[in-house]
Image (tube, grey):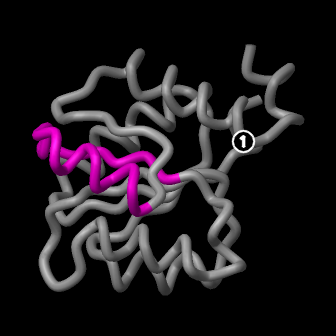
Amino acid sequence: MSADYNVLIVDDVSDNIKVAMNILKENNYNFSFALNGKQALEIIKTKSFDIVLLDIMMPHMNGFEVCEYLKRDPQTQDIPVIFLTAKADLDSLAKGFKVGAVDYITKPFGMMELVSRIKAVLRRTMPEAKEILQ
């Protein structure tokens, strides 16, 4: 079941977090959230996550910086990051992949898109997820 997977949502806009949380809840994923990059890095030290949904445009520490930090740390470097953002320009897309993201979803997004991409990433990164997430 999806409830075996823990997702961290990081966005400075609470309405965006609510949309993602409702989708994840409806699809039986466990989730936590952070309202900024620093908070996300604190939360990720205390709990294990299978995937991070990360906004790019946040104050103080943007999503690119958070992703770079996660990829430098041996304890978090293997957690897949999907950028969830309104920044759809090619430079942002390229930079997202350069800093370590595995996927990129532009806002606004729908339930099918978010769930399908999460499942695809989990199937690629977690061999034991292949059968469960069919």
**Position of 61 relative to 77 (above/below):** below
Q: Position of residue 48 (x, y in %)?
A: 70, 67
* Residue 18 screen position, x and y as percent: 28, 46
15 is higher (above) or lower (below) than 62:
above
* In magenta segment, residue 129: no
Q: Is residue 72 left or right of residue 130?
A: left
**Residue appearing at x 30%, y 45% in the figure:** 84
Assign the N terminus to one quadrant of the image: top right
Give the residue number, with chain letter if any, for mark 1: 125
Left or right of residue 131: residue 55: left
Q: Is residue 96 above or below residue 116?
A: below
Q: Relative to 59, is 112 on the left or the right?
A: right
In the depicted structure, whether residue 32 falls above or below residue 61: above
Q: For numbered disc 1, what is the local secondary structure?
A: helix
> Label 1 amino acid?
Thr
Image-quadrant location for residue 20: top left
Task: Find residue 113 and report its image quarter.
Answer: top left
Q: Nearer the viewer, residue 93 or 112?
A: 93
Q: Which residues are magenta?
A: 81-99
Residue visible at 20% across and 58% down in the picture? 14
Say whether residue 114 is left or right of residue 52: left
Placement of the C terminus among the 4 image quadrants:
top right
Q: Could you say which quadrant of the image residue 39 lies in?
A: bottom left
